[in-house]
Image (tube, rainbow, N blue to C red):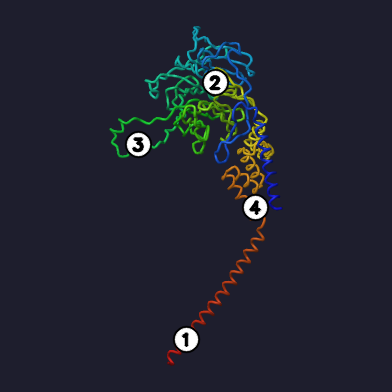
Amino acid sequence: MKKKIKKLLSLVFTGVLLGASMTSLVASADEPYDVYNYDRWGEAIPSQAGYIADRAVSGNDLGVGHFDSPSDIFRDYNDIFYIVDSGNDRIVAVNSDFDEVIKIYDEFTMPDGSTTTLQNPMGIYVSEETELIYIADNENARVLVCDYDANVVQEITKPTSEVFDQNRTFLPQRVIVDKAGNIYVVLGNITTGAAMFDSSGEFTGFYGANRVEPTAEIIGNYIMNLFTSEEKKARQARNVPTGITSFDIDGDFIFTCTSSTTQTTDTVKKLNAAGDNIFSSMDLTFGDYTPMYDSTQNKTMSPQICDIDIADDGNINCLDFTTGRVFQYDEDCNLLFITGTIAKQVGGFDQVVALESMGNNLYVLDQQKNTVTIFVETTFGEIVHEATALYNAGYYEEALEPWYEVLKRDGNYRRAYIGVASALLNAGDYEGAMEYAELADMPTIYNKAFEGYRSEFLSDHFTAIVIILIILVIALIILSRFSKKRRLAREAAEKAEREKLIKEMEDE
């Protein structure tokens, strides 16, 4: 009978698991690419999609002719998108619905009244504070600054400063501007950080250089240099860091990324005004946790973060050139979603180069397909973003229900376990916080919850604990005295026995 019951329970349990699996498959059946995330052990597992590809827009769709190797996309404070159409030497401004062209910037008026054109532009930024457009005009070796009517107000070229290597060509690739009007330029052949100019165009130095990757060779060279003469050191090749690939600005912070396949430190940085990396002390991974193996090319593909975007809600979007995927993180760099892939269908890419966001949408630029793919938020993504926004704003308890809803839809979603653990910790439910922190593999939250649980336990049972301690002390005292009496009695008996033996020996 017991065996039959066990067999029946086993069948029921199996049926439940199969039902859950089928539900998950149905929920993700409409996705044009494999959707996955990572569990607490760092293993890739199927997951619910946060975004789904809606459509891909080409230059022909917009009525401006075929895009040719576009290299950047930017959304300004009026929700106008600017597409850098590099091969056609122009900037195409479109509306937020991507169905109407606002303006084409292909000819500019200089201050003296003459006209100028772009030559392989590669980056663009529109400043709300200055109300000016900044264009990285690569092959013209300049940053062109103009108003919305294409009237040039400033032209930044190679600095004559001794700090800037005069043997280097000035090749702007990306440009951003802070609230004070300072201009930051990523240069294609410079690895010492972004070139920084003040609002008047004066060169002020370099900003945000990456650290040199501490490889075994570099460490060995450093040790050898301790015993090498200055003359030999001067003849040795210098180790240089990899350059910044792209960046974005969010308030007082500048976020940078590098697409080097050999760089593991400073892949993504969050820099303050002094150029210090806020992420430097954190153990972070951007892109896939482990390099992906491509059987078609028979080689391992390491992540190459080629662009970065900070969304309006503070989430960090990283574009991986290697896999054609967008990796989205919250403010604390917890992975939220992985979107896109290398593929021919909508939602897949040939060669990604830039991304942008607006509200609930993501916009990814493909340099080979010459299209902008628009991803829209799913219901699951909406719930996750709601919970994340509440959590980041400090409303932990309010975020609890959305996090529970996330777990109902995806029981393996690690970020939700972290959110629930934090909410329960904040609410004083230390046992629950410990349980969810353990499921999320978050020792920091678990330790805080354990400390709270221990303090609460001691507070609730203080009187009982004191009474028990008093009883234990009294018992120890009594036991000690009893043991002492027994010891004294034993010693007296042993002494008497020895005296008896001595007397008997004397009598003999």
Question: Quadrant of the image for the C terminus?
Answer: bottom left
Q: Which residue is mark 3?
A: 221
Q: Position of residue 352 (x, y in %)?
A: 53, 23
Q: Are marks 4 and 1 in contact (CB under 8 Å)?
A: no
Q: CA distance from mark 3 to mark 4?
A: 55 Å
Kind of element beneath mark 2: strand
**Could you tell me if the residues under marks 2 and 1 are in contact, i.e. CB atoms within 8 Å?**
no
Evaluate if marks 3 and 4 touch, with contact meaning CB atoms under 8 Å apart: no
Distance of mark 3 from mark 2, alpha carbons? 41 Å
Q: For marks 2 and 1, give the one nearer the viewer.
A: 2
Q: Which mark sits nearer the N-terminus, 1 or 3?
A: 3
Mark 1 packing: few (<14 Cα in 10 Å), some, or many (20+)?
A: few
Q: Earlier in the sequence, mark 2 or mark 1?
A: 2
Examine the image and state in which quarter residue 189 appears.
top left
Instruction: Kindly identify which residue carries mark 2.
Output: 366
Q: Earlier in the sequence, mark 3 or mark 2?
A: 3
Number of numbered labels in the structure image:
4
Find residue 134 and report its horizontal and vertical position in percent: 52, 18
How dense is the environment of label 3, judged by Cα within 10 Å: few (below 14), some, or many (20 and up)? some
Which numbered disc, 3 or 4, marks the residue that appears first in the sequence?
A: 3
Q: Nearer the viewer, mark 2 or mark 4?
A: 2
| Mark drawn on residue 456 | 4
Residue at (53%, 33%) from the top-left corner? 288
The kind of residue on which mark 1 rests is Glu
Which mark lies nearer to you, 3 or 2? 2
Q: Secondary structure at mark 1?
A: helix
Query: Residue 332, can we see it?
Result: no
Question: Which of pointers 4 and 1 indicates the residue nearer the eye?
Answer: 1
